[in-house]
Image (cartoon, rainbow, N blue to C red):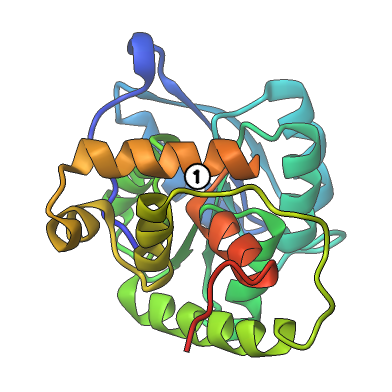
Amino acid sequence: MTEPDEGGAPGGEPIRVLIVDDHELIRRSLALALAAEPDIDVVGEASDGQEAVELADRLMPDVALMDVRMPRQDGIEATRGIRASVPSTRIIMLTVSDEEEDLFEAIKAGATGYLLKDVQINDVPAAVRGVHEGQSLINPAMAAKLITEFANMSRKEAERPPQLPVPRLTEREMEVLRLVAKGMNNREIAKQLFISENTVKNHVRNILDKLQLHSRMEAVVYAVRERMLEIT
């Protein structure tokens, strides 16, 4: 949904990355590509979801590259486990699956990005930097599928009884959230609303703080579920 921001970790500290895939060749390829970047440090590798959760709890990575299909525990379950134990870790799903159900389940589990394995290996470091900076990372084709899922979810949730009161967002914050739900990145939102990209980032940060969430997509899922947004 967004183009990752360039730049390293705040304060000059390298971005700590955990690689999770049951194929050793893929892990090695990713590790080599990331190790070549001075602002990225590969701190561990796991071959299944259960090992990933254990390593994340011990290593506390900034970003995890997570396969969806793995033995013992799949990537979506592992994502839930990591988000529960190390909520600061941003998770990029890296998979051959472009199925809407996998995409939506990954976002609900707390994934911040979703890349297909046909992505160019040289693009992965930029993706890591982007999610570390707080961006959501989903390619345009998959963003369209996700928006369709949001619309379906919105219709279903309209039939559900109201829950507890939800935090109030300002009119401008709601405008930003609606555009996020449409798949726009920060640059596109800034252009649409005639404001700066930094102002957009500040609005997104405020939205996440108020909703006590960690990613833009989690905010959209929450807003649809609580009927703050209607997506058609």
* Mark 1 surroundings: few (<14), some (14-19) or many (≥20) residues within 10 A: many
Q: What's the residue at 87%, 60% (across, down)?
A: 72
Please say if 146 is above or below 106: below
Q: Amino acid at mark 1?
A: Ile
Q: Relative to 155, is 177 on the left or the right?
A: left
Horizontal and vertical percent position of residue 36: 30, 30
Q: Tell how many labels.
A: 1
Q: What's the residue at 52%, 52% (across, down)?
A: 112
Horizontal and vertical percent position of residue 182: 37, 73
Please say if 19 is above or below 153: above
Q: Quadrant of the N terminus?
A: bottom left
Residue 118 appears in view:
yes
Q: Please tell me which residue lies in front, 108 or 165.
A: 165
Dividing the picture into quadrants, the one containing residue 143 is bottom left
Horizontal and vertical percent position of residue 149: 57, 84
Dividing the picture into quadrants, the one containing residue 75 is bottom right
Dividing the picture into quadrants, the one containing residue 199 is top left
Q: Relative to 10, is 31 on the left or the right?
A: right
Please say if 86 is above or below 117: above
Residue holding disc 1: 207
Please say if 210 is above or below 161: above
Q: What's the residue at 42%, 78% (across, down)?
A: 142
Q: Relative to 157, is 229 on the left or the right?
A: left
Question: Tag 1, which secondary structure?
Answer: helix
Q: What's the residue at 69%, 35% (across, down)?
A: 87
